[in-house]
Amino acid sequence: MSLIVKAVAMKTRSLSVVATMLLCATLAQAQTPPPSQPPPTENEIVVSAKRSGAPMWTIDTPTGTVLLVGEIRAVPKSTPWEPERLRDATAEASRVILRAQPKFSPGDVLRLIFRGGSFTKLPDGRVAASYLTVEQRARLASLETRYKVDYDRGSFLMSSFDLLARRLDFDNSTMDDATDIVEKAAKRAGIAIVRPERFRGEDLLDNLAAAAPASHIACLEAAMAATEAGQSIIEARGDDWRRFDVPAVMANPLEIALSTCWPWADEDLGGEIRDQWTRLITEASGTDGVTLAVVPLGVLAEKQGVLDQLAARGFAIAGPEWR
C-alpha cells in the first residue's frame, strides 16, 4: 500500500513540476514585449499622405523628400477627401512647413479703429463711378439691386470681400483646411513646425492704407464674376481639387477672385510671400527625412509661382500637371 502511495505522490509531484514549468513559460511569453515595429519609410509616409485625396507634389533629394500639399481655402463638406490620412502622415513626418499668421499688436488694433474709414470707404468723398468704367459700374449696380446693398462709397476691397463672403457665401458648410489638420496633428505628435517670417500687423495695415483705390478694381471685377457665376462654382472647385485637376481649379472664378485680391495681388507683399515659400522649400530640400509643406494652391500653381520657380532651379517635381 505504501508503494502505491509513494508512486502516486511522485506522480503528483512530477505533474506539479510540469505544471509549474508550463505556467512559468506562459508568464514569460506573456511578459515578453512584442517586437518593435520599424518606423515608416519615407515612401510609406508619402503614400499615406496621398491617400487623403489632396493634390500633392514630391521632390526627392539625396537626403529625403519634400512633400508639397496644395491647399485651397474653405473645402466644401461635399468634397470627398480623407483628411485623417493626412493627419496620420503628419505624425510620422520629420517636420512640417505651414503658412505664417500676421502678428497684430494692441496698437495695431487701435490704429485700425481710428483709421477704419480709410480702409472701408473710398477717399475724399468719392464714389464708385469716380474709378469704374460705365460697364463696371453697371455690373456692380446689378449686384446691388439683387442683394439690396449699397457699394457706392465702400472701398473696392471691402465690397469684394462682402460679395464673396456674404453674397456668394463661399466659406459656408466647409471643413478644416489642410493647414488646420496638419498643425493640430504636428502639435499633438511633437513634430517641428516651420513657418515663413511673420508680417507685422503695422506693416500690413500700412501696405493696405497706401494702396490706391484703383489697385483693387481687378479684385472687384473677379469678385463680381464669381458672385455672378453662382454657388455651383464652390462645389466644382472642391471636386476639381479632389480630382487633381489643378488647371481647372486655377480657372475657377472663385479661385481667381481669392488669388486676385489683396494681399496676393500686391506686387511687393505678394511677391515677398511667394519668395518666402520658395526659400523655405529650397532649404528643406537639404534636410533629412520627410518635410511636409502645406502651401496655398494658388501660390504653388500660378504662372511663375512656387512650382515654376522650383522647376527653374532644377528640382525634379513629381505630381499633377499644374500648368
Image (cartoon, helix red, strand yellow):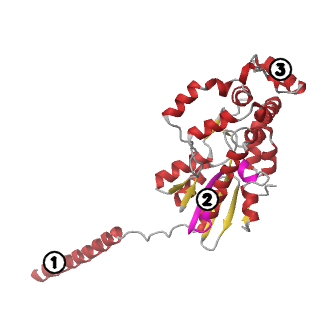
**What x and y, as percent, mark residue 246?**
78, 51
Residue 173 shows which numbered tag?
none
Task: For the residues labelled 1 and 2, say whether their Cβ atoms are less than 8 Å apart.
Answer: no
Image position of 122 with respect to 184: above or below? above
Residue named by callout 2: 280
Question: Which of marks 3 and 2 precedes in the sequence?
Answer: 3
For the residues labelled 2 and 3, the Cα–Cα distance comes to: 44 Å
Q: Residue at coordinates 81% horizontally, 17% vertically from top-left?
A: 145
Q: Which amino acid lies under the numbered mark 2 shown in the image of this protein?
A: Leu
The amino acid type found where label 1 is placed reads: Ala
Q: Earlier in the sequence, mark 1 or mark 2?
A: 1
Q: Which residue is mark 3?
A: 141
**Looking at the image, do the residues carrying marks 2 and 3 touch, with CB atoms under 8 Å apart?**
no
Question: Which quarter of the figure has residue 221?
Answer: top right
Q: Residue 174, relative to residue 33: is it above or below?
A: above
Residue 193 appears in the picture as rendered: yes
Which numbered tag is attached to residue 9? Answer: 1
Question: Residue 220: x, y in percent?
Answer: 78, 31
Q: Earlier in the sequence, mark 3 or mark 1?
A: 1
Location of residue 284 with respect to 252 vertically, above or below: below
Q: Badges 3 and 1: C-beta atoms under 8 Å apart?
A: no
Q: Bin the neighbour count of mark 2 within 10 Å (Cα to Cα): few under 14, some 14-19, many 20 and up.
A: some
Quadrant in which the N terminus appears:
bottom left
Q: Is residue 25 magenta?
A: no
From this view, report whether residue 19 is shown above or below residue 96. Answer: below
- Please identify the residue farthest to the bottom as the structure is shown: 3
Relative horizontal placement of residue 38, taking residue 209 as reference (left or right) = left
Residue range of the region highlighted in magenta in the rendering? 283-301
